[in-house]
Image (cartoon, rainbow, N blue to C red):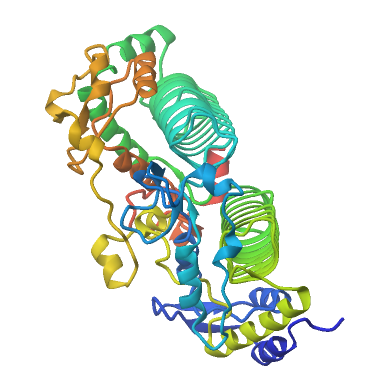
Amino acid sequence: MSSKTPQFDKGLDEILRGLKPHKRICKICGGEFEIFPEDIKFYQRFRVSPPTLCPLCRMQRRMAIALRIPPFYRRRCSVSGHSESVITLFPSTAPHSVYDNAYRRSDNWNELDYGREYDPATNFFEELKKLFFEVPHQALFNDPKNVRSDYAIGGTEGKDCYYVSVPIRCENILYGYLPMDSRDSVDVANIETSELLYECVNARGSYDCNFSANIENCRDSWFLYNCKNCSHCFMSSNLRNKSYVFCNRQLPKDEYEKKLKGLELEKRSILEGLRNEFEELRKKAIHRAVDTRNAVGSFGDRIYDCKSCFYAFEAHNSENVRYTASAINVKDAMDIFGVDGSSISYESASTGYSSNIFFSGNIRGCSYVEYSFYCRDSHYCFGSVGLRNKKFCIFNKQYDEETYWKKVDAIKTAMLKRGEYGEFVPTGWMPYQNTLAQVEFPLTHEEAKRKGIEWWEHEDDEILRKIQVLDVSEIPDTIEETSEDILEKAIVCPITKKPFRVVKTELDFYRRKNLPIPVIHPDVRMRARFDAINRFRLWRRRCRKCRKDTFTSYASDRPEKNIWCESCYLKEIG
């Protein structure tokens, strides 16, 4: 079968011919990284040149295209003749064109109207960036099936969700990240099949738990860390199949209930002290170096039911993937982030149900797409933005099949010579502070500025400027003392000095759980939960139990010191 891009293939063959395992220096961080034999097999199969960045810098670049972190803003819709404000993650000062969701999904505009002829002699990334800003973006990237979930990003089939990122088949979740098949929970991250959770991270199959992390099948408990199949437990860690345990000490039921009642957990002042105590408990607990289940021939953390995954994190039901984070049902992929139900993907992010996707982001139902973003149900497209049900497009301009391949050959050949082909788009096309890169690779505004990464601040919210604000000292210590008029006021966060409001559904939740309303801004609470989730990287540390070296997602400078290797952990804790 003859090549559709003969000139490009000729140039690439010269690069790949004789390529052997070796070490390279990352052109961004200056660190050394290795090209392994297994990597080379991918480059040869995918027909791409080897990377110039280390795995971490490559990951940062991909994550910087994924807008998945609140805060939410209000700004004017960019549609001509529209005067309404829309809820969005794009600050008002950002240059992106933003359409309200209904109009953006409609047939009232045509993405091909933004098409232009691309000259292969010009800088590819500079020209693509112009198109990226001009083609209208959806105000919020969410599922049309969402119900009463205006403040929700991504996900599918969310109902009555507020201030939530990626809710999947969830109902009545507030202030959350990646809740799945769960309901009636507030301030949560990475929860699954759970209900009535508050301030919980990494919870599965749990009910009515508060201030807990890494729990599975637990209920009616407070301040638990790394516990499974437990009920009516308080301030404890590493429990299995226990009930009525108080501070890791087994008690009779009546004594446990008496102690719990005497704590006055309905008071914020009490809870703040207990949260500090729980943080100390968590630091001293036994920590599993990495969490893997049925991960055959795999290396990484949080790998479940996978095969042949290397340097993979949060991978589920995937096979033959390398350098990946957040992969579900993925096969044959390398350097990906946030990919679901896809195969044959390289240097891509936020992709679903697609195949043969290279150097692209926010792609769904597509195939044979390169250097394209926010495309749906499109095929054989290169350097395009916002396409819907299109074929053979370059820079949003449609061609016949023969012309398409001739132009793609010329573009890829020129890019290869300039060292552009094989690289993901530069960081800074999205507001960095609202991307998941800010979670894994946090930067201050000044640090981003020094690196040449765009930030784009948002103007103050006019609504919050017009309502009465309350200092923390004016907020009641219990929910019983909190009246309904709190909904008409704003609370000034003592950390950010920014005001925020409590919504009706949230107030109802606190009353149901007999919990005080929070006084810390939702953005700070969200980022604290992100900090409780281990990073997408590994360090070599010594097992505290057997003293042998092991790999772990707990960095050596973290406060957790009691890290156990897989063998010791399963033998002792299970």
Q: Residue furthest top?
A: 254
Q: Going 52% across and 71% down the picture, which residue do you hit?
A: 424
Instruction: Answer left or right for 519 relative to 360.
Output: left
Q: Going 79% across and 83% down the picture, which residue do you hit?
A: 3
Quarter of the image that includes the N terminus: bottom right
Between residue 532 and residue 450, name the one nearer to us: 450
Q: Is residue 336 visible?
A: no
Residue 343: x and y in percent read 71, 59
Q: Residue furthest right?
A: 1
Q: Going 45% across and 49% down the picture, which residue do you hit?
A: 68
Q: Give the quarter of the image for residue 464.
A: top left
Instruction: Answer left or right for 269 relative to 187.
Output: left
Quarter of the image that includes the C terminus: top right
Q: Give the quarter of the image for residue 210.
A: top left
Q: Is residue 48 visible?
A: yes
Residue 329: x and y in percent read 69, 50
Between residue 223 and residue 404, name the one nearer to us: 404
Q: Is residue 278 above or below residue 422?
A: above
Q: Is residue 57 above or below residue 390?
A: below
**Count of numbered circles on the image:** 0
Residue 472: x and y in percent read 16, 29
Between residue 215 and residue 484, name the one nearer to us: 484
Instruction: Answer left or right for 409 relative to 503.
Output: right
Residue 347: x and y in percent read 58, 67
